Amino acid sequence: MDRLELRSGQYLTLDEDKVDPSCTFEELSLSGVVEFAVEGTAKQPPSCTTLLAGMEPATLLSKEMWNSHGSATGCHCGGTPPEPAECMVGVDPGVFARRIQADGYYQTGQVVSCPASCEQLVKQMAYLNSEMKLPPCFIYMFDEAWGLVREVWRHVERMLGHPVLLEPSVAAFKLDAKDSTNKSPGRNFPLPHRDYSYAECCRPDGSPKMLSVWVPLTQVTAENGCMFVVPREFDRQFDQDTAWEHMRPAHIEHKTSYYLARTTCLTFPLDGIRPLTGPAGSINCWLGNTVHWGGSCQRSALDHGVPPRASLALVFRAVSSETDALTSSLLLSYEASKDLSVGQRLEYVQHSLHAFSHWYKLPSSLVSLFSK
């Protein structure tokens, strides 16, 4: 049985055989497959109420619905992701270990064995936005996205030299050159930041306990929205966890709106930053404490025939590293990623939306649907 929490105390329950007898709250049937329940109350759910982009609650857990919306691009939901090809591209683990500790980031060439799969995911993201009004993170409903994740996963384990688990904070991005001020989910986040402190992501010897991985699905240039990082040598607070500025590499003063600030104070030199450009299907990775941010897509990129950047973002964690209770419950092993149900995929989409909700303005339809 799959159960997806919507708002606090509200659940969608998928039961292929019968209602879960362990339920302690009143269950109210909307269909023969999906039950809607409100904990501690017998209030009827809103009949035929649209909760998300014209979809009724039952449809969210419908494999058929997602497959119908993936048919135009050849994407599928509810099957087994394609088995990744053997790692044929040479990524030297020794070089990676030296560079990630010295610089705080690392880049490969194209490692995805089928570049066409990247283009397919970009098209499906565009469909999600235009036809379903859904942000890019819903790409994780489809087998093809998980197939690419699993292929990248193998490369990451080879670079690190040990098995890793996937954190639930999966993300997806697709920029828009026509409206760079749009800060809805899936657009770039322009404020330099660290995702974790040094102690959270590095062992005492400086080797990584976790790794942030960013996979471009399009060619990435400085014009169409590449990521920027601050190399370790230009970051005085890189390993200074106790310093006030460590988790505030850029802080806004005299904020005038959501997007604009009168003054942004930086703790690093601008001449030290580096753009992460490269081909679709490559891996850009950095330590969680490396300062980074996403650039906007300039209109000039379209003039040069370069589409706005689209990408997937993942965080891999060593099996032995400590986590909080919530994160631990959603950490995913490589083997488990092969057979994710529709409900489990929705859980990761839910976590993605709320993990980054402090960055973006979530549409009311999404806020009302998913609980924090």
Image (tube, rainbow, N blue to C red):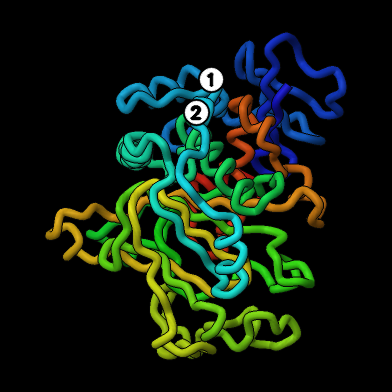
Q: Is residue 11 above or below residue 106?
A: above
Q: Position of residue 155 (x, y in %)?
A: 55, 45
- Tell me the residue at 76%/15% (across/down): 19
* Frontmost residue, 17 versus 55: 17
Q: In the displayed structure, does residue 157 sit left or right of residue 360?
A: right
Which corner quadrant of the image does residue 243 belong to? bottom right
Q: Is residue 55 above or below residue 350?
A: above
Does the rendering let one see residue 196? yes
Q: Is there CB contact under 8 Å for labels 1 and 2?
A: yes
Q: Circle 1 sits on which residue?
A: 79
Q: Is residue 177 above or below residue 120?
A: below
C-alpha span from label 1 to label 2: 6 Å
Q: Is residue 244 above or below residue 155?
A: below
Query: Of the numbered discs in the image, which one, if any, rests on residue 253?
Result: none
Q: In the displayed structure, does residue 232 sit left or right of residue 264?
A: right
Which corner quadrant of the image does residue 323 belong to? bottom right
Q: Amino acid at mark 2?
A: Asp
Q: Circle 2 sits on which residue?
A: 143
Q: Earlier in the sequence, mark 1 or mark 2?
A: 1
Q: Residue furthest left?
A: 303
Badge 2, how many Cα within 10 Å: few under 14, some, many 20+?
Answer: many
- Tell me the residue at 31%/39% (across/down): 119
Does the rendering let one see residue 62? no
Quarter holding the N terminus? top right
Q: Position of residue 25 (x, y in %)?
A: 82, 29
Q: In the displayed structure, does residue 244 sit left or right of residue 21?
A: left
* Frontmost residue, 14 versus 244: 244
Which corner quadrant of the image does residue 348 belong to? top right
Q: Position of residue 39 (x, y in %)?
A: 78, 35
Q: In the displayed structure, does residue 67 sit left or right of residue 303?
A: right
- Tell me the residue at 87%/23% (across/down): 22
